[in-house]
Image (spheres, grey):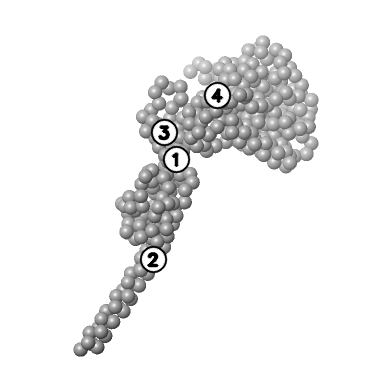
Amino acid sequence: MWKSIASNGLTLIIVAMIALGAAVGWGKAQYSNAGPLEAPICVRVTPGSNMGAVSEDLAEQGAVSSSRIFRIGADYANKANQLKAGSFLVPRGASMEEIVDIVTRGGQSTCGTEIVYRIGVNRIGVQVRELDPATNRFVETVAFTPSDAEPPAEFVAVRDRSDTRYRVALAEGVTSWQIVEGLRAVDVMTGDVAAVPPEGRLAPDSYEVVVGDDRGDLLSQMEAAQTRRLEAAWAARAADLPYQTPEEALVMASIVEKETGVAAERGTVAAVFVNRLNRGMRLQTDPTVIYGITKGQGVLGRGLRQSELRRATPYNTYVIDGLPPTPIANPGVASIEAALNPESSPFLFFVADGTGGHAFAETLAEHNKNVAKWRAIEAERNNN
């Protein structure tokens, strides 16, 4: 009898062990295999949260099949206490193991709210936007100017959240003075700027910053980026260009940047100016004259007067030969590359064509016809 009982007990223990092993194997498979998530989601981990709360949130959003297995797996991997605050993008079909790694890895948030301080040629603006996980594109929630009396509630609600990211975006063609003024409006940064950096030496781009970053350090980062771009373009430059130094090429790039906002035109505009320099012709470009008036400190806000076009200044390319002494703005990488590798073109003139682009001409007679067309377009617009 006792032998029978012992045998049956041993059988039950073996069956239980097999069942336990099967359960453990099933749990491991659930933890490491692809998950049920059908579309990417953004998971926000608040400061002080725990793996239990995160697992429940993930289960509610359909990212994990079992919040219990998720917690057990995180504990088994010794990551249950390594949760990082932030907003994290969880891709479609991510396994529990992958999600645990995402929310414990640390570093910058990969989704959620982003505040962008945009420093443009005509204005400084602030944009609050959210990443749409389904499209991996940002969607604007509110935009305003820092000079507004009261910032919108949408901005105030997210400004001090620990998972909010910050970015400073420079438009191509902004001046160094405009950049410094814009950085002073970035209220999450610290430090004063003792002097405006040299014109043209700051790279227009989008820069991620964190609360407390120094403005001077960011300017140094911008300057280093522009130096790298210029050096790379200079090394790959075309032959027989009318520039003796990279600085002269940067001057040309800034003129190209201010003359056209149409990306496809940059190489042609650069070709016109290179052709004029090679023929000993004056550049005769309005943006340089304007810079001589404003010194890059704001926008002129009106048309040029005939007296200004005749006045002799270092930047009046209707009067001086060759290039002005410095860049007139901070050009983007495309304009730098256009200045150093212009298109092969016979054009010597261009004028606005009414579409946002320009009409190019090889001869003065053809150019005068294009000018007449543009003036007719202007007159019609003024009458409407």
| Mark with earlier residue (3, 1) | 1
User: Tag 1's secondary structure?
Assistant: strand
* Whole-percent x, y for residue 95 in the image: 41, 59
Q: Label 3 vs label 2: CA separation?
A: 41 Å
Residue 273 visible, this angle: yes
The CA distance from mark 3 to mark 1 is: 17 Å
Q: Spatial distance from mark 4 to mark 3, Cα to Cα?
A: 21 Å
Q: Residues within 10 Å of mark 4 (few under 14, many from 20)?
A: some
Q: Amino acid at mark 4?
A: Glu
First along the sequence among labels 2 and 4: 2
- Image coordinates of residue 287 in percent, x first then y, are 64, 22
* The furthest residue to the front: 2
Residue at the disc numbered 4: 181
Residue 272: horizontal and vertical position, in percent? 71, 30
- Asked which secondary structure carries label 2, the reply is helix
Examine the rendered structure and indicate whether residue 188 appears above or below residue 92.
above
Q: Residue flagged by tag 3: what amino acid is it?
A: Arg
Residue receiving disc 1: 138
Give the mark, 4 or 1, whose residue is nearer the N terminus. Answer: 1
Taking the spot 55% from the left edge, 24% from the top edge, the residue there is 181
Amino acid carrying mark 1 in the image: Phe
Dot 2: within a 10 Å radius of its alpha carbon, few (fewer than 14), some, or many (20 or more) residues?
Answer: some
In which quarter of the view is residue 317 placed? Answer: top right
